[in-house]
Amino acid sequence: MSYLPSGLPIPVPENDGLDKPYWDAARKGELLVQRCKGCGTFQWGPEWICHKCLSFDMDWHKVSGKGRIYSWERPWHPVHPALKGYGPYIVVLVELLDAGNVRMLGNLLGDPQQGVRIGAGVQAVFEPHDNEKPPFTLVQWKLA
Amino acid sequence: MSKRTLRGKVAVAGVGETPYYRHGKAPVSEFKLALQAILAACEDAGIDPRRIDGFASYSNDRNDPSRLAAALGLPALRFSNMNWGGGGGGGSAATGNAVAAVACGMANCVVVFRALAQGQFQRFGAAPPGGTATGEAALNAPYGVMSPAQRYAMRAMRFLHENRIEPSAQRAIALASYHHAQANPRAVMHGRPLTAEAYDSSRWIVEPWRLFDCCQENDGAAALIVVPAEEARDFRQPPAYLLGSAQGSEYRNGARGHNAPLYATSSFTTVAPQLYDMAGVKPADVDVVQSYENFTGGVLMSLVEHGFFKAEQANEFLTPENLTAPAGKLPLNTSGGNLAECYMHGLELQVEAVRQLRGQSTAQVPDAEVSMVISGPMVTPVSSMILGTEAVL
């Protein structure tokens, strides 16, 4: 059971393969972010170069999925046909505590009308969409 | 070496608009709207359209300069310019680019324009059905983050949280636009006043924004004509001189997946100081401001970042009284702006900024001499500009 109804755009890796390791790992229940082999800086979203030291030698680093809510929103108005008659839902922006506080976006699982507190601890969970073509897995968030 | 600047070198000599329509309601094609606005600006300036020798626009406007030049029978096209970036962030930048071209002699009479007929193309506020998402979109769309409101609400939410800003601050911005639109017969929301109670009871689009925090979507077109300062007195209308122009965004604003280090920003923290430096004025010198309302929270942050008040003063400063002409401390969006006049992608704000300097606004600020436009908060690049009368040169 996914948090949002099916029919939303399906995420696929970029043609140049930049973010393929992230999406492949999510299928296996692992959360990866980029980390520079040269200077150790964490980076998200994916990019071909380390913004800090300008090395092209970027690596993928497995993280625990422990996070903290940095900001959030609650969409009510459906802008996509798949969301007609659905909603509201909650989107959170999460800082990853063991990855240099890079931020990831996702839905906050649970009651869509719950109060949301900036600073609250959250944990990544994996939401497989096995029947989509192609199948994919989303990283979602639950209160820790 | 003297300081390199655009200050006082170029002026807006003409402005033009089509009638403004609700989205999908334009009775003519988008290209015809563009032509109508350009011809209206020529009429306003009192020039033969064949004097035009350049075009500048933004946000991938579909009406390209070569087709316009051919349609208008221009003897020579000398300047064609598109400012990168979606949204309205490039509005003042487009004018800045046109001014730069005129100032350095690349062209002599440049049109800045924007035309939109969203009913004839994809609407900004609705996502196309189905399909796939890659890159930045893959990190957003599967989570239900697709429209501009959904894309930027979290920036504003963080800013409101950090600075303990009350809902009344955003509300005052919406009320000011609707108030001014009631005096403006061109405004799509003319005759449809907004009360605080109606605002408070309006539906959520995406928290923290209600219906009236969000811009309209409209059809129409607007245009400005810029000419060298030494010729500016020869036109039908009093000139509005460009004092300053700046565009861009701060450190890593465009980092993907909402990873801008300074997230709670309208993107003007480095742009606004450049603007004031070129214009040679301070916030206190600005008589009237047109600040692009994609969403009221973006206006709030823009005004803070342009130095009109500090974030912690937002609750006391942002009241309808302070924001309305003629007597408010900072008259804001005096035509009704994107919220209540027309979402002409912010170019209507530039037209209004010129009107204020000519004394032709329907919500005139007495003796306005320094007039600011802020374009497209929260996107990147953003831009802003300051215009002035001859008296402040």
Image (tube, rainbow, N blue to C red):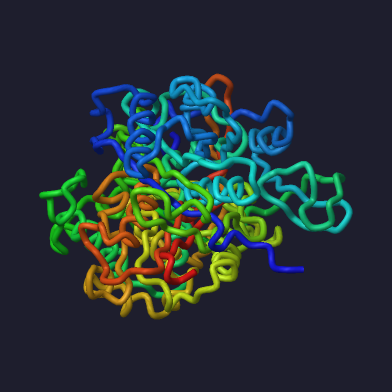
Q: Measuring from the top left, give residue B263's x and y in whole percent.
A: 55, 61
Q: Is residue A141 visible?
A: no
* Residue in the picture at 50% in, 39% down: B57
Q: Of residues B112 and A55, which is closer to you in this image? A: B112
Q: Measuring from the top left, give residue A138's x and y in whole percent.
A: 56, 38
Q: Is residue B16 above or below residue A42?
A: above
Q: Is residue A4 above or below residue A68?
A: above
The N terminus of chain A lies in quadrant: top left
Q: Measuring from the top left, give residue B273's x and y in whole percent.
A: 58, 69
In the image, is B118 to the left or to the right of B327?
Answer: right
* Residue in the picture at 38% in, 80% down: B313
* Residue in the picture at 39% in, 52% down: B350
Q: Measuring from the top left, give residue B196's x and y in whole percent.
A: 16, 64
Residue located farthest toward the left when viewing the structure as drawn: B191
Q: Is residue B245 visible?
A: yes
Q: Quadrant of residue A47?
A: top right
* Residue in the picture at 48% in, 34% down: B51
Q: Of residues A24 and B103, which is closer to you in this image? A: B103
In the image, is B215 to the left or to the right of B160?
Answer: left
In the image, is B63 to the left or to the right of A56?
Answer: left
